Amino acid sequence: MFTQRLEPVSSSPPPRPTRGFPGRRPAWVGALLAAALLFPHPSPAADAGDKAPLSIFILAGQSNMEGYGGINTLDELGADPQFAGLLRQIKRPDGSFVAHTNVFLYYHRQEQTIVAPVTVGQGAWPDRLGPELAFGLTVGAQLPGPVLLIKTAWGGKDLYCDFRPPGAGKPAYELPGSPRETGASYRLMVQEIHQALDHLDANFPQFKGRERRLAGFVWFQGWNDFCVDRQIRRQVYDEYAANFGHLVHDLRAEFNLPRLPVVVGELGVDGEARGNTEMLAFRAAQAKIASEPELQGTLGYVRTAPFWYAKLDELPRKLEQEERRVRGVVAARLKQERAGKPDAPDRKRMEELVNEAFDQARNQDEALLRVQREHDQVVSHWECHYYGSARVYCAIGRALAEAMLALQPRP
């Protein structure tokens, strides 16, 4: 095991460097990704030579890029044969977790900065993981040099306002609610990237003097645009692709990389979402990113809905049914016991009594407890976070990495 190095976040950013990112060198994309999963860490590609450049990838977005995959659900990754090799890269047979010494993460999380090899626990909370884990392992297995991931993400942020880039201008519609500052998250994202690059030698002294290249930008975001106020929903959907095109243009100009590879992960919550017309409409709006002129030949668009699987629909529903059953039994018993008492018609008091009795009864009902245990092996958070499924976050991370590797220049 290892201890992550955590540093306080500086209250004031360091001076920005001169624009441009020196030392750009094409990356080698080696053996097939599927075969790479069979090799123990470190991968053959990682040993290709000490002179290979440090490849740096930016991972940006909102809460699903932060990552809410519960570590306690990670074993479910092995339930699908296609991911069994990935699980072995993450977790040893004795139950301990691997810290991958050729793939590193730089990530502001709340009041701390994670500066450490990629491993579990680097999601939104210390008991969570996000796409960074499988993304890092997948690119690290294929690129000849070390890899650094700069993760810059915050929950509850949208593209139409929070991440709105300068090139998009002000919205042509009025934003509902309190006055909001447009572009605040975009500016913070750029600031954090500069902070990571400015402090690279101090935070990762093992890379001092090594050539480095900013190799790609990954975007995984969408929930707050999807569920935006109905007053402006159509406008937000209609301009999503154009706003993202401006974001990429502005980011490329910031770092003087006009062909910076870009990968986008769709909002895949609820799987294929049959019958959810709003979700399908938003995904259609996201998919238009692929037709943005700014991105032609440099974009990978990844569908994430297929990684949603049956248990994510079945187990929450099954648990809810069991809880409803136990609650019904408790309510019927209390109603019978209180029949004829002066406060029997008091609905508020009855609800309080039912809640108290249910809390006790649920811990004694074997059928409910059995379903609860099964549920907790798969589900650890809200639906909007893929129910906190580590399996889904790892599958998404690997798919994003595969799309990014396909965009890397060959020697």
Image: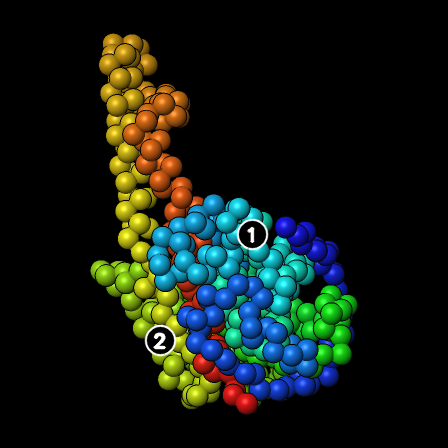
Total count of labels? 2
At numbered mark 2, what does the secondary structure look like: helix, strand or loop? helix
Q: In which quarter of the image is residue 208?
A: bottom right
Disc 1 vs disc 2: Cβ atoms closer than 8 Å?
no
Residue indicated by mark 1: 97
Q: Where 119 sits versus 344, above or below? A: below
Which residue does the image show at 35% across and 59% down from the upper left?
81
- Rendered position, 209 above or below 159: below
Q: What amino acid is labelled 1 in the image?
A: Phe
Q: Residue at x 72, y 73 (%)?
A: 207
- Sequence-first tag of 1 and 2: 1
- Give coordinates of residue 107: x percent, y percent: 62, 62
Residue at horizontal 74 percent and vertical 70 percent from the top: 206
Question: Between 395 and 282, which is closer to the camera in this rendering?
Answer: 395
Please name whichever residue, 54 or 278, is drawn nearer the observer in this view of the structure.
Answer: 54
Report the residue at 26% width, 23% height from top.
329
Which percent across, then down, holds residue 175?
A: 46, 66
Between circles 1 and 2, the one closer to the viewer is 1
Tell me the residue that label 2 is attached to: 287
- For the residue marked with disc 2, what is the amino acid? Ala
Q: Quadrant of residue 406?
A: bottom left
Tag 2: Cα neighbours inside 10 Å, few (<14), some, or many (≥20)?
Answer: some
Could one spot residue 168 in this view of the protein?
A: no
Question: Where 253 falls versus 321 (above or below)?
Answer: below
Q: Going by the image, does 411 lie left or right of 295?
A: right
